[in-house]
Image: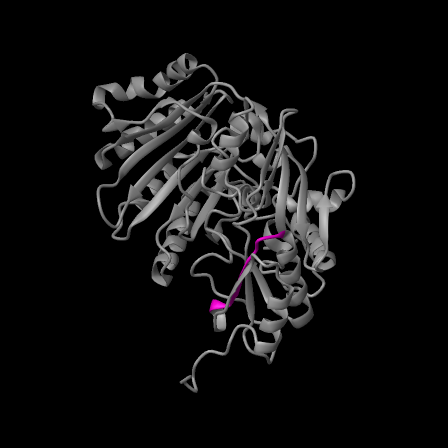
Amino acid sequence: MTSATAAPPALPPDLTATLRSRLSHGARLTEGAGAAGAMVQAAEVSDVVAAVRLAGRHGVALAVRGPGRSGGPGAAGRPGRPGGPARRLTVDPDRLAQVTVSPAGWARVGAGVSWRELAGEAGRHGLTPLTGGSASERVADTVTGGGVGPLARTYGLAADRVRAVEVVTGDGALRRVTPDDEPELFWGLRGGGAALGVVTAVELDLLAAGPRYGGQLRWAPGDAARVLDAWRAWTATLPAQAGTSLVLSRPRQGEGGVAVRFAWAGDPEDGVAVLDGLLGPLAAGGRPLDSEIAPRGPAGLATPQQVTDPGSSLLADRLPDDGAGAVLRAVRGSRPRTVELRLLGGALGWVPERPSAVCHRDSRLAVLVTGGAGSEDRAATRACTDDVAAAFGADLGGREPAHGFAAVPDVLARTPTPAVRDRLAALAAGADPHRVLEGAAPR
């Protein structure tokens, strides 16, 4: 028996029946209530079209499911039309998993394909993708979120390698977007987030497979200050062929510490020589606790898992003395927390042939702070990030902190400039006239 106070169904019975009748035989519709919403597990692109069209006609908020996405686990729904019950529909694209690799040097991947899966297929042809930050991240998510991968300093953003995007826009139209056919939408989809449509497939250029070298070194918590000092000095002259980040962690369970991630695009012997520039000054204080540095496949340079807890981030021109101290203090509190310093610069600062909605390419450093998904944890993470921002001061270059994000979008796409925000809003108004897409109002 249903309680009188139970949440109303996310979709009323008539809309549920209508949507079921329009889905393909292999698709699944899971019903939920209230903010939990209903979910369509798409088996074909036509299922995405059916979901988006129903959402537009009946004022149902629409999201895309995935780690770090607004439709991911624990996300709150956006209410439907004023005065009506909460209505929310999530599209899960994971089964759109087709991969086609052309020997000519490009690939077409469905929206459910991860970088690890694409790298495996491309490797059979002697090719490799320019991955996003996590090997488990979906290619489509990386494209809409920018895509600062481990070799971004060498080759630029993953989104800069895109040839075409297949997307169902908020008006229910399936479009193949290219720089020639729809240049404005092509600009916005790469880095513009979820405001413009549900991506169903992506075409992107690949690189010739070559040697890759890197991994992670880890030190004890007591070594954090000296490792940070050495890393800061080392990165001041690091060539663009190298990518690196430093991670300070205080976990809920187990031992934390400090880790340095390193990625090298080229001969491993040259990578060893570059890494010695960091390890040499640290040798007097003892060896790392462990090292996973080794020759790697293309996806092996990316982190294995995505960050799913919401967090905050900063973009800066450099790491000042006060900023270094604030970063160290951030992981000495009572709450579990992870702080990552990610070196930018290199090819990220180059103007791409086909501009995108990604901003702040001139940034030299990103600081990412995460600390749990609970409301108190999120508030503490935000306050901690604001303290770090105050310590950086003018070295932020006027860039505002970004709060409440997980893996998508990536650090450069979280705080659009006013001009980019206005341009995305104009695009969204045309592509999503009913304003059903979650995230349809760009930040």
Residue at 63% of width from left, 26% of height from top?
A: 105
Q: Which quadrant of the rendered structure holds the C terminus?
A: bottom right
**Front residue (pair 318, 74):** 74
Residue at 30% of width from left, 17% of height from top?
A: 280
* Coloring scheme used: one colour
In the displayed orientation, state which residue is furthest to the bottom: 4
Q: Which quadrant of the rendered structure holds the N terminus?
A: bottom left
Query: Can you give x and y, in whole percent of width and height, for residue 228 in the image?
Result: 33, 31
- Residue range corresponding to the magenta coloring: 36-44
| Relative horizontal placement of residue 372, taking residue 192 as reference (left or right) | left
Residue at 46% of width from left, 78% of height from top?
A: 7
Query: Can you give x and y, in whole percent of width and height, for residue 88 in the image?
Result: 55, 68
Residue 115 seen from this side: yes
From what the image shows, is residue 74 above or below residue 202? below
| Relative horizontal placement of residue 264, taking residue 196 as reference (left or right) | left
Q: How many marks?
A: 0
From what the image shows, is residue 251 above or below residue 74? above
